[in-house]
Image (cartoon, helix red, strand yellow):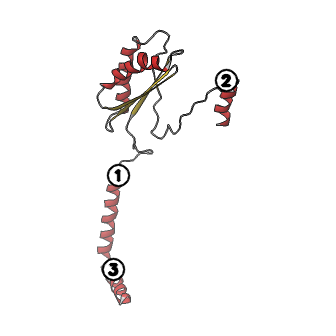
Amino acid sequence: MFNTILNQTLKNSITQRWFIVVGAILITLWGVVSITQMPLDVFPEFAPPQVDIQTEAAGLAPEEVELQITVPIESAVNGLPGVTTVRSSSKVGLSMVQVVFDQNSDIYKARQSVTERLQQVTNQLPEGTQPPEISPLVSPLGTILQYAFTVDGEGKTLLMELHRLAEVTL
C-alpha cells in the first residue's frame, strides 16, 4: 500500500513538474521575505537598559556615604522618565547606584538624562568627594561577576600582592 502511494506521488510530480517548480519558487520567495524582515542582533537585548553610577568618598563611613551621597543621587535619578527600579549600595567610601529603565527605553538617552541629573547633584555632595562616574556602556552579558579583595585583620597583605592576585591569578 505504501509503495503504491509513493509511486503515485512520484508519477504525479513528474507529470506535473511545472506545478512543483512554481510551488518550490513560491516557498523560496516566502522564505527570503521572512528572513529579510526578521530582526537580527549579535546579542539580543534580554535585559532592560541600566546605568550604573559610582561615587568615591574616601574616609566616610557607610552611614555617611548613604546619607550624604547615595540618597541625593537616588532622589535625583528617581524621577527620570522610564525608570523602573533604583538600587543602591553604600560601603566604606563608596556609593553604587544602579538605575534600571523599562525595556523600550533608549540606553543613550537614559545615560544622557542620568548625566544631566548628576551634574545638578554634584555641587550638593560633601567636600572631598569624587564626582559621580557612570560606568561604561556594556552588553547585558558584560557584567558576569563582580568581586572585591580585602586585607586581613592584621594588615599584613601588601597592596601589590592584592593587585597581582587580581590581575595575574584571576
**Circle nearer the viewer, 2 or 3:** 2
Residue 34 vs 47, above or below: the answer is: below
Mark 3 is on which residue type? Answer: Ser
Residue 73 or 154: which is nearer the viewer? 154
Residue 135 or 36: which is nearer the viewer? 135
Residue 109 vs 139, above or below: the answer is: above
According to the picture, the residue beneath numbered tag 2 turns out to be 159
**Circle nearer the viewer, 3 or 1:** 1
Q: Residue 164 vs residue 62: left or right?
A: right
Residue 65 vs 111, above or below: the answer is: above
Q: How far apart are the alpha carbons under marks 2 and 3?
A: 79 Å
Secondary structure, mark 2, is: helix
Q: Residues within 10 Å of mark 2 (few under 14, many from 20)?
A: few
Residue 144: percent from the left, percent from the top? 51, 39
According to the picture, the residue beneath numbered tag 3 turns out to be 13
Q: Residue 123 vs residue 159: left or right?
A: left
Residue 1 or 127: which is nearer the viewer? 127
Mark 1 is on which residue type? Answer: Thr
Residue 115: percent from the left, percent from the top? 39, 21
Give the numbered dot on residue 36: 1
**N-terminal-most mark, 2 or 3:** 3
Residue 59 vs 113, above or below: the answer is: above
Secondary structure, mark 1, is: helix
Q: How far apart are the alpha carbons under marks 2 and 1?
A: 55 Å
Q: Residue 125 vs residue 147: left or right?
A: left
Mark 3 vs 1: CB contact within 8 A = no
Secondary structure, mark 3, is: helix
Q: Residue at x 49, y 38 (%)?
A: 142
**N-terminal-most mark, 3 or 1:** 3
Q: Residue 34 vs residue 134: left or right?
A: left
Mark 2 is on which residue type? Answer: Leu
